[in-house]
Amino acid sequence: MRNSRDGIITSHVGSLPRPDELIASNHAREQGSAGDEQAFQRILKSSVSDIVKRQKQAGVSVPNDGEFGKSMGQRVNYRAWLNYIYHRLDGLEVPAGRVDAPPRKASADELVPVDLMERRDRARFIRAYTDPDHPISTGPGRPPRPVCTGPIKYKGHAAIKADVANFKAALAENGITEGFMSSIGPGSAARLGNLYYKTDEEFMFACADALHEEYKAIIDGGMVLQIDDPSIADNWDAIVPEPSVAAYEKFSMVRVEALNRALKGLPQDRIRFHLCWGSWHGPHTTDIQMRDIVGVMLRINAQGYSFEAANVRHEHEWSIWRETKLPDDKIVIPGIVSHATNVVEHPDLVAERIGRFADVVGKERVIASTDCGLGGRIHPDIAWAKLEALSQGAEIATKKLWRKS
């Protein structure tokens, strides 16, 4: 992975606004004919090329493919980071008539997260979450989700091969030497219902073994692998009642063990991990504090750690790095602009936020990024304005920080 040796470099978390043509083509593809599949693949390749070019124009140093290979036939695509795995793992199906996830099977860790619709943040602000006139409303329910009904095996070889090929070609076309591709972590993949394995823990380790194949394909393709696993932090909100920090740390370390198993044998210097508290636009008053989860995060076998640091619930937590030792071979990739507000951060504020991290961990070990994926969470025009502000702020920070040297 590149570091900021000669100046602050920029990146982001993953999802970017999808073009209308790609959304429409994928919708047609989901209806299902060979012609629609062929048309989708042509549009997908072109869209990936365009999105890499757009990131370069916005000043993004380490771009991605926009997660376009995880396309959904709808404009609100922020859940593609999770939903795509439904099509890449064998052993999952949507039971007829099932709406709610089946009961969780107790594992050795004893803590059992509740369903999304029962989380503590939602319960505390239920009137807002269920008010159809309020922007954060999630309504009374959600569509059925798959459950595990058989042995988990990876079946996404053709899809990930195409993703890698499309992105590799786009990078070459735009003269870019390094890009990243994201993949779901086993802790998050295994939050689906489990009707097959004896425990959810056994289910999660089966997901880890399967996902290793996707991870290896991304790295073998020459990309930096980003692991998206919000379960490490946002399961805290899903455990009712609130557990002790010690109990949650024990619970989370099982998920870290599963992820490290999935990463076994892969070069650590080609891996970055993304931590977040869930990207939905809610109050987040029941998020676990960064200081209580940072030690768990640092146990993950990655070189870079991406985390939310710009939204108002977590911006103050940059200061924990004064007391937390970042290993010498690691870098941080803090969110410097947020997906949680339509206000576009001023470049001077961007530079100030970058400076905070540079002062405590060293400027060479900071990559400026976003809190979470911007696709689907804010209007496309605002998303691009934020990435441009990120780049402009990084230039300001570079001038200030390297002038000090």
Image (spheres, rainbow, N blue to C red):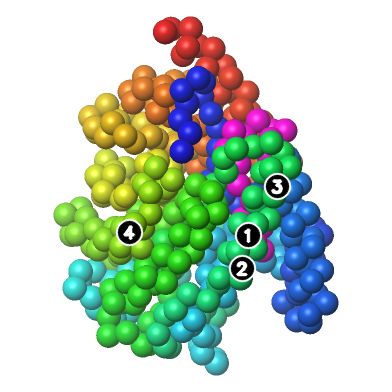
Asked whether residue 391 is in view, the answer is yes
Q: Residue at x 43, y 42 (%)?
A: 306
Find disc 4 in the rendering and name its residue.
Answer: 264
Residue type (three-letter) at the residue carrying disc 1: Asp
Q: Are discs 1 and 3 less than 8 Å apart at CB?
A: no
Nearest the viewer among 128 and 357 is 357
- Disc 4 is placed on an element classified as loop
Q: Residues within 10 Å of mark 3 (few under 14, many from 20)?
A: many
Write down the region rendered in magenta. Answer: 55-71
- Disc 3 is placed on an element classified as helix
Nearest the viewer among 72 and 183 is 183
Query: From the viewer's perspective, is 109 left or right of 375?
Result: left
Find disc 1 in the rendering and name its residue.
Answer: 163
Position in image of residue 97 (x %, y %) = 54, 91
**Which one is earlier in the sequence, the residue at label 1 or at label 4?**
1
Q: Residues within 10 Å of mark 1 (few under 14, many from 20)?
A: many
Residue 27's quadrant in the figure? bottom right
User: Does residue 67 belong to the magenta stretch?
Assistant: yes
Q: Residue at x 41, y 61 (%)?
A: 185
Position in image of residue 198 (x %, y %) = 27, 85
Find disc 2 in the rendering and name its residue.
Answer: 159
Find disc 3 in the rendering and name its residue.
Answer: 170
